[in-house]
Image (cartoon, coloured by chain):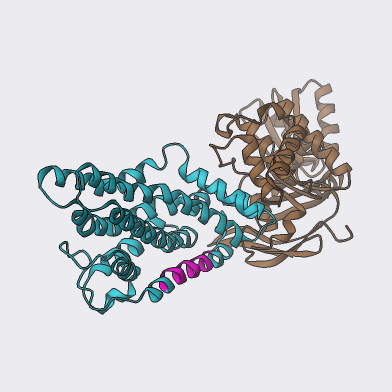
Amino acid sequence: MNSAAIRCENLSRWYGEVQGLAGLTITLQQGVIGLLGPNGSGKSTLMRLLTGQIHASRGWVEIFGQRMFPGQHQLFRQIGYAPGEDVHFETSIALDYLSLLAALGGDGPGAAKKRAERALEKLGMEDKRQVQLQAMSKGMRQRIKVAQALLFEPPLLLLDEPLNGMDPISRRHTLDFVKAWAAQGNTVLLASHVLHEVEGVTDHMLLLHHGRLLAEGRLHEIRELIDSKPRQATVYGKELRPLAAQLLAEELVIGLSFVGEDCLQLDTQNLPALLARLQQAGAEGQLHSLETDDRELEIIYDLLVGEAAR
Amino acid sequence: MNSLFALIRFSFGRRAAGMRLLGPIVIALLPTLMMALVLMEKSMDAFDLYRSFMVPATLYFVLPLVCMFIMLPVLSELYEKGAIGYLFTRPQPRWKVLTGLYCGALLATLPVFLASVLGPILIGFSFSSPTPWNKWIGLGLGVFALLFLAGMAYGAICLFLGVKTKRPILWAFIWLVGLGSTMGSLPGDGQQYSLHYYLISLAYRWCGITASKTDLFGPLETIAPVWLCLLVLLGMTALMLLASSWAAKKRDIL
């Protein structure tokens, strides 16, 4: 495929006065792309726009160089889509449900059944083929959703929160599968509101918040992007007021607040310098413990989202 | 064709699975029950009773309710749950998906309509009707054909309402009961704007059912010719299917 897998230009969607997605312009090439954002950030809106389920208020979407709009059915030979909502064909058994969707791809009854069985095998669910969807756990139904997206082995997979409700083993299995799928030259857009779920399979992220693109790029680029943003450290100890005064005088903090007499929260533009100073204070016995917000990559995401929210 | 047949099978299964047809069948058998009660109380010609009272009751009450029960949820239910997204994100045009769902649900009305026709015939026979069986069968086939034709048209209206409106039950009641059976039974020229007028004209032409002891048919001053009745009923079916397809492209799946 020469064209970009996904191109969006000034893509916007309003629900009455509520902004679902605002002016999104992105170009995504082959590979796994993490689509991150809290609930209500516009992930599902973007997925629905990419699959022509809703109309754009402004802008456009291209999938492999072709415009996507509601009713544009030919493109679905190249797209596998697993929606965020729970599957709704509760009374169907897994094999019938997948066979129906395979038949909608043009397969005859026999071929549809075989294709459905293959998809179940890919997700390690071959023993669940005769189980009714309503009798499955949420995690199993999530895997069924992924299986239906994979029926025709499409070059573009759109997975909306596929890991919700999955147990750790299923998560690992699904993520491994996503990784392997992309390694074969395919594209996967993986939506999630939890960074660490996605970071295991890709470092290419799109971060959405309140319908706006907060950041896009490699994870380390996003880290660099936030280096200039205020960071936070929390210290615990006795008689912290003199220390607070010293830090302010040395201009190592831009803000501070006491959370009780023994706990001090510090905001800084220069976390490394502040940490060095606090280590010194710790060595002098002024501090009991120290926490920073630089624990996990997830903090980066929280920080970005927090910054946008402010 | 594979996809169309798969959708028909799916839709039929969804409408007819489990006890889902029980409600419509109970409604369809109400005229049968009434007929049995009347025949137990009074000495009447069962054939006349069926033709004069029960067929109009079936066309006016049973038909719209059965259509609403079976055809209305075909799409409204899928839209409500967002499940339509699974079907509309396949490489099939939306009109084809709608047609498959519609045909499957229409098939599910057949056993209900059959019950509404066979019930009175069996009651008639069990009360030793003097009318020869071939007249019963002829009338039964005629009524079944009427119900099927009307089911097609009203079913297509239900399909359209299921896509177009978020309050399909209210609108279906207005269209099927208000503009359908009620307006079709009121005297005056307005009658001709109701699908029921054409249905009643066909009932007259095919089954010899006239305005009647029940007054349910209203004083039909002119009886529409068969070709016009068929044109209106089939035309409305086609029009509503097209409108459903148009509405499906316009409506967002949320």
At 16% from the left and 43% from the top, the residue drawn is B37
Give the vertical position of B95 relative to B126 (above or below).
Answer: below
List x then y, in percent, for residue A270. 82, 42
Quadrant placement of the N terminus of chain A: bottom right
List x then y, in percent, for residue A290. 76, 27
List x then y, in percent, for residue A106. 71, 52
For chain A, the rendered hue is: brown
At 72% from the left and 26% from the top, the residue drawn is A168
Give the vertical position of A191 relative to A54 (above or below).
Answer: above
Range of residues picked out in magenta:
B232-244
Q: How many marks?
A: 0
At 35% from the left and 76% from the top, the residue drawn is B225
> Can residue A210 be seen in the rendering of this structure?
no
Q: Nearer the viewer, residue A263 or A57?
A: A57
List x then y, in percent, for residue A126. 71, 29
Q: Report the magenta stretch's main SS.
A: helix
Give the vertical position of A181 relative to B117 (above or below).
Answer: above
B95 lies left or right of A115: left
> Can residue B15 be seen in the rendering of this structure?
yes
Q: Nearer the viewer, residue B162 or A292?
A: B162
Residue farthest to the left?
Answer: B42
For chain B, the rendered hue is: cyan
Whether the magenta-drawn stretch holds residue B250 is answered as no
